[in-house]
């Protein structure tokens, strides 16, 4: 994956953006975690369905963090961060929504490590709920497709000379699609599910569109300045929580369909 591709992925949502910028925090090892009894997670205070401060639902990432910490026998402490540049000042041990491109080389950030993915995510093509004539991207022959400004779909569609309208957020795109301001839009799965939970039938996912591999990614937990023992413990818990249906049920409570992580591509023997 190119440097430009990685940079554009940061725009997929406020909470997800934090996942790529917390390299300077203090971190924790498994032994230190058991000694101090608290895991500190960085999260955005106003980024539902990912995370939120003072809301009835805290966001699926924080609910997953709560389950993980309880299973580890420690407390969850949340440090609220609005801008990614503030992550370096925050004393966070983990970020729950780390974007991982299947097949990407391991990160070279010292003791900062990724767990195995707990879900897959990506962009979906959505159309107004009452329009059924769109079955593929090529069916959008008139009008424009809503995209988040500078997102990867914005770049790809511009390269293909497909007319677009750019918006500041994915919720703005969904409002535009629901209101017929655009004929379709590219929005990530969590935002689509959350929007439909609040506005049933307002938009529909064009299920017949084959997902572009560049529009898909896995999601894992980023542990900062940690050790392999904590990574191994987290991996075991993630496996158990997925197998038991706990993580899928958390996502379902936000209207989000669970998608299993994409498998790592097989590497040819050298």
Image (spheres, grey):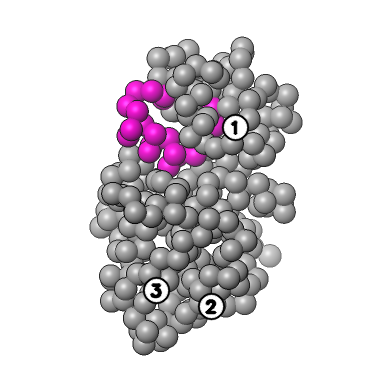
Residue matched to label 2: 26
Element type at marker 1?
strand
Task: Give the residue at x 41% y 25%.
Answer: 204
Q: Residue 10: horizontal and vertical position, in percent?
A: 60, 50
Q: Quarter of the image containing the C terminus?
A: bottom right
Q: Earlier in the sequence, mark 1 or mark 3?
A: 3
**Labelled pair 2, 1 in contact (Cβ < 8 Å):** no
Is residue 192 rendered magenta in the image?
yes
**Front-most of 216 and 155?**
155
Q: Is residue 248 left or right of residue 232?
A: left
Number of residues whose C-alpha sits closer than 10 Å to that of mark 2, classed few (under 14), some (14–19) or many (20 or more): some
| Residue ID for mark 1 | 167
Q: Is residue 247 above or below residue 79?
A: above
Residue drawn 63% across and 30% down? 166
Say the numbered circle drawn on residue 39: 3
**Vertical placement of residue 179 versus 223, above or below:** above
| Measured Cα–Cα span from mark 3 to mark 2 | 11 Å
Disc 2 versus disc 1: distance between alpha carbons? 36 Å
Per the rendered image, the range of residues in magenta is 185-204
Q: Reading the chain from its start, which is encountered first: label 3 or label 2?
A: 2
In 3D space, how far apart are the residues under numbered discs 1 and 3 (Cα atoms)? 36 Å
Discs 3, 2 touching: Cβ within 8 Å = no
Camera sees residue 117:
no
Residue at 37% across / 84% down in the picture? 36
Residue shown at 52% from the left, 49% from the top:
14
Figure check: 180 above or below 241: above
Element class at badge 2: loop
x and y percentages locating residue 131 in the rendered image: 44, 14
Local SS, label 3:
strand
Taking 52 as reference, is 158 above or below it?
Answer: above
Give the mark, 2 or 1, whose residue is nearer the N terminus. 2
């Amino acid at each position: 994956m190119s440097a430009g591709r990685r940079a554009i992925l940061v725009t997929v949502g406020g909470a997800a953006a934090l996942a790529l910028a917390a390299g300077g925090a203090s971190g924790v090892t498994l032994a230190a975690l058991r000694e101090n009894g608290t895991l500190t997670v960085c999260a955005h205070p106003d980024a539902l369905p990912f995370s939120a401060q003072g809301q009835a639902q805290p966001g699926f990432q924080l609910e997953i963090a709560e389950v993980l910490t309880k299973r580890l026998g420690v407390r969850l402490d949340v440090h609220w961060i609005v801008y990614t540049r503030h992550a370096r000042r925050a004393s966070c041990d983990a970020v729950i929504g780390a974007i991982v491109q299947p097949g990407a080389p391991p990160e070279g950030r010292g003791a900062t490590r990724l767990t195995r993915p707990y879900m897959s995510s990506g962009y979906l093509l959505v159309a107004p709920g009452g329009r059924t004539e769109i079955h593929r991207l090529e069916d959008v022959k008139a009008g424009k497709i809503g995209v988040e400004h500078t997102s990867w779909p914005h770049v790809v569609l511009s390269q293909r000379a497909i007319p677009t309208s750019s918006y500041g957020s994915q919720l703005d795109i969904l409002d535009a699609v629901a209101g017929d301001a655009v004929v379709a839009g590219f929005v990530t799965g969590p935002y689509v599910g959350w929007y439909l939970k609040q506005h049933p039938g307002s938009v529909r996912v064009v299920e017949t569109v084959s997902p572009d591999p560049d529009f898909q990614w896995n999601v894992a937990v980023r542990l900062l300045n940690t050790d392999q023992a904590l990574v191994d413990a987290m991996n075991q818990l993630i496996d158990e929580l997925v197998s038991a249906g706990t993580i899928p049920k958390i996502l379902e409570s936000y209207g989000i369909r669970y998608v299993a992580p994409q498998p790592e591509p097989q590497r040819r023997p050298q």
